[in-house]
Image (spheres, grey):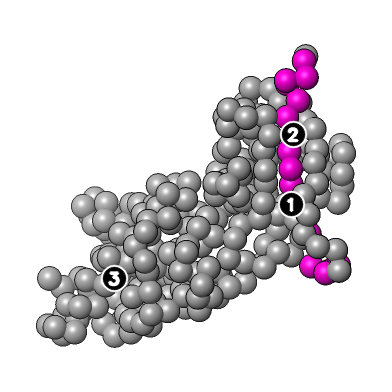
Amino acid sequence: MTDKDYFTFKILRYDAAEPDIEPHFQTYKIRVIPGLTILMVLLRIRDEIDGTLAFRSSCRSAVCGSCAMVINGKIDLACRTQAASFGSNTIILEPLPNMQIIKDLVVDMTPFWDMYEKVKPYMIRKGDYPDKEIAQTEEDRKKIDQYVNCILCACCYGACPVLARNPDYMGPAAFAKLERFMLDSRDERPDNFLQNVDSEDGVWGCDTVLRCIEACPKDVRPTDSIVGLRKQLVKNKLFGKGKNED
Ligand code: FES
């Protein structure tokens, strides 16, 4: 074990319950071995060095979406990022942008969930829901594959430059979820449902700079959904066509 095995972790500390103390970086030295993830580093700091450090995690397997943060300037999941992967032994950890810090690396995700709720992120049927499952062809399922992969980590929300200047913008994850249901052969939401996103706070506000695609740890492409929703809105206006119609 040598000095170079020890990495410096600079972690942004702030507690909204103590607003008089400005956000500041606190430094920890941790020995890094191959395979050690950023989440493992945080758990070690919290369990062995500083029990006051706050961060979210659950699955440790890039599934639950709770450990998103900024790692050396890049938004990613702490549980899938290896500490030794940066070519530097100094690593800076900050909370996700575009949301208020509650404590340290924990942000208030209320605005993210509020926007998500606006698109009614569940299947809507015209009549009664059938007793059995609704069959779907393989071809129809493929249309929604990428969007089903979303784990609601809010990496895209944190990376979005539009949200940085307009907190009323609905954000990439909400659009990706809406498109997931618009493309779903089993969903029967009313044709005028897209009115909910037909505004500058909706799909027309996107800068299409693709930061959401770069940030997504699950290879979802929210910009594709925005383009799809915009096209459908134009079709509806020109031809009065609704969901699933050419
Ligand atoms: S802990 Fe679940 S995604 Fe990282």
Question: What residue sits right under mark 1 in the picture?
Answer: 12
Q: Quick one: 53 or 57, which is closer to the camera? A: 53
Residue drawn at x 80%, y 32% is 29
Q: Mark 3: which amino acid? A: Leu
Instruction: Rate crowding at label 1 as few (under 14), some (14 to 19) or many (20 or more) other CA atoms within 10 Å.
Output: some
Relative to 141, is 12 on the left or the right? Answer: right
Residue drawn at x 37%, y 69% is 206
Is residue 185 located in the magenta-colored stretch of the structure? no
Relative to 56, is 180 on the left or the right? Answer: left
Mark-to-mark CA distance, 1 and 3:
37 Å
Quadrant showing the C terminus: bottom left
Residue span colored magenta = 2-19
Question: Which comes sooner in the sequence, label 1 or label 3?
Answer: 1
Question: Which comes sooner in the sequence, label 2 or label 3?
Answer: 2
Question: What secondary structure is found at the residue carrying circle 2?
Answer: strand
Residue 115 visible (yes or no): no
Question: What residue sits right under mark 3 in the picture?
Answer: 229
Q: Mark 2: which amino acid? A: Thr
Q: Quick one: 177 or 9, which is closer to the camera? A: 9
Q: Mark 1: which amino acid? A: Leu
Q: Position of residue 188 (x, y in %)?
A: 29, 75
Q: Position of residue 192 (x, y in %)?
A: 29, 85
Using the rendered view, name the quadrant where residue 120 is placed.
bottom left
Residue 200 visible (yes or no): yes
Q: Is the residue indicated by label 1 positioned so its CB lies within 8 Å of ligand 1?
A: no
Using the rendered view, name the quadrant where residue 33 is placed.
top right
Is 186 above or below relative to 236?
A: above
Question: What residue sits right under mark 2 in the picture?
Answer: 8
Question: What secondary structure is found at the residue carrying circle 3?
Answer: helix
Q: Is the residue indicated by label 2 positioned so its CB lies within 8 Å of ligand 1?
A: no
Is 182 above or below relative to 85?
A: below
User: Among all residues in the image, which is located at the extreme top?
Assistant: 1
